[in-house]
Amino acid sequence: MKVGILGIDGYLGWSLCLKLLDRGHRVVGIDNFFRRRAVEDLGSQSVIPISSMEERIEAANGEISFEEGSTLDFDFLSEFIEKHNLDVIANLAQQPSAAYSMRGVEEATFTQENNVCGGLNLLWATKNKDIPIVTIGTLGEYGCPSMNIPEGFFKVEYEGMEDILPFPKQGPSFYHVSKQQTTDNVWFACRTWVMRVTDVMQGVVYGTRTPEMEDSKLRTRFDIDECFGTAINRFVASAVSEHPITVYGTGMQKRGYIPLRDSMECLRLIIENPPNYEDSYHGHRVINQFHEYYSINELAEKVKKIGEEEFDLSVEVRNLENPRIEPEYHYYEPKHEKLQKMGYEPSTTLEEELKIMFEDLLEHKDRIVKEKIVPKIRWRE
Ligand code: USQ
């Protein structure tokens, strides 16, 4: 297959590229290097050193090409799609951080413009072409309702009548709302045009590597700052640098998590098996992608235990006033059956993955900018 990856330089984009090359697919990618610039502007850096795109391509084993550009540039995007004759396109050109989207009006506007309008450009550029598309949504779109969360659609009964409808969305940041809007745009486009889109409702991804990253020039980025670092990644980096693990609020909030290596395996399955008219509604297939869910306290305790018992570190867990507005005591039961049916089997455990992360991060401990771990962005200020 010839796969287009939009946002090929990011944490997920680069990992996906290597996974697909390893499977013998051809990859063509675009990126505008937003993530490299944004992390630098925040005064942080990828803890794992990463190579330039030129070096990456040289070190990669397989057929890959790259063009610099943004999904916000419609002419560039259309030409890219037109000339490459792609079998499938994965859109990872996203501003992925909830905290960044709550930093100020500029960041909120950028997040929504990039994620919503970039996605809209992709829909217009592929209109009626029937090129399968994969978009990365988020489990957080559903919020934390007091009921089980289906994979996208559910049967509703109201006043004696029933229908199958998209499950309600109530994400906890302007970032999450940008994903909700994208889901709505995709759903509308699928009902209107000839489209096949998989909307991946992904949980929080963690981990430092995938099996395709043995060569140090092929490593993907790893961020720990309050915007681009996510829970488990930040916790291991905190433990390694002997900074307290930052549990927001009571730490009772639950989320779904998936290791980077398994997330890539799931995306591979999704790419190689595009939606058909049985596993989708009008070509719109929604898949919840995570392995297990945990509360923040459970994660912090697991990181502390491994840090102390296996790596002889002294690890402190500290509860901070929650900078976000989010439910802390809530029901959480998202379904995740579709990927299992497609053949996904978890390849690792949280504990095994944490040990690899500790080893990798201890090697680059000096690159952890500790001050950037402390959260300063507050949802209500
Ligand atoms: N949290 C802490 N301490 C920290 C960081 C986070 O307690 O130092 C808590 C947050 O309050 C939240 C949970 O951990 O309850 C998850 O936060 P996060 O920063 O790890 O993840 P989130 O902001 O939800 O966003 C991340 C990715 C995003 C993806 C999403 C999946 O940045 O791209 O879509 O995870 S989900 O969380 O399911 O919406």
Image (cartoon, rainbow, N blue to C red):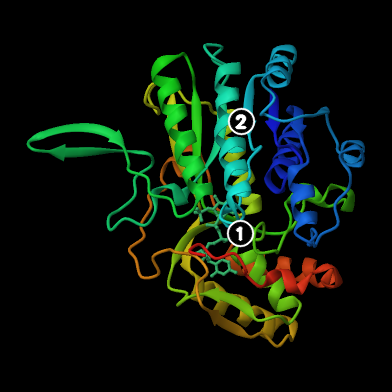
For label 2, the residue is 118
Horizontal side of 71 relative to 178 (left or right) equals right
| Amino acid type, mark 2 | Gly
For mark 2, give the secondary structure.
Answer: helix
Foreground mark, 2 or 1?
Answer: 2
Q: Nearer the viewer, residue 132 or 33?
A: 33
Q: Could you say where residue 65 lies in the image, as x and y percent from the top left?
A: 83, 27
Q: Nearer the viewer, residue 341 or 43?
A: 43
Horizontal side of 150 relative to 114 (left or right) equals left
N-terminal of the pair, mark 2 or mark 1, is 2
Q: Could you say where residue 147 lies in the image, as x and y percent from the top left?
A: 27, 55
Q: CA distance from mark 2 to mark 1?
A: 34 Å
Quarter of the image for the N terminus: give it.
top right
In terms of image quadrants, where is residue 80?
top right
Ligand 1 appears in which quadrant? bottom right
Relative to residue 292, is residue 284 depicted above or below? Answer: above
Horizontal side of 283 relative to 18 (left or right) equals left
Relative to residue 189, is residue 353 depicted above or below? Answer: below
| Amino acid type, mark 1 | Thr
Q: Could you say where residue 146 lies in the image, as x and y percent from the top left?
A: 28, 58
Q: How many marks?
A: 2
Q: Nearer the viewer, residue 329 or 278?
A: 329
**Residues at marks 2 and 1 touching, judged by CB atoms closer than 8 Å:** no
Residue at 70%, 12% in the rendered image: 82
Residue at 48%, 64% in the rendered image: 380
Horizontal side of 278 relative to 367 (left or right) equals left
Q: Could you say where residue 254 lies in the image, as x and y percent from the top left?
A: 44, 65
For mark 1, give the secondary structure.
Answer: loop
Q: Find residue 348 and name its label.
A: 1
Q: Find residue 359 and name its label.
A: none
Residue at 62%, 61% in the rendered image: 230
Badge 2 crowding class, 10 Å Cα cut-off, few under 14, some 14 to 19, many 20 or more, is: many
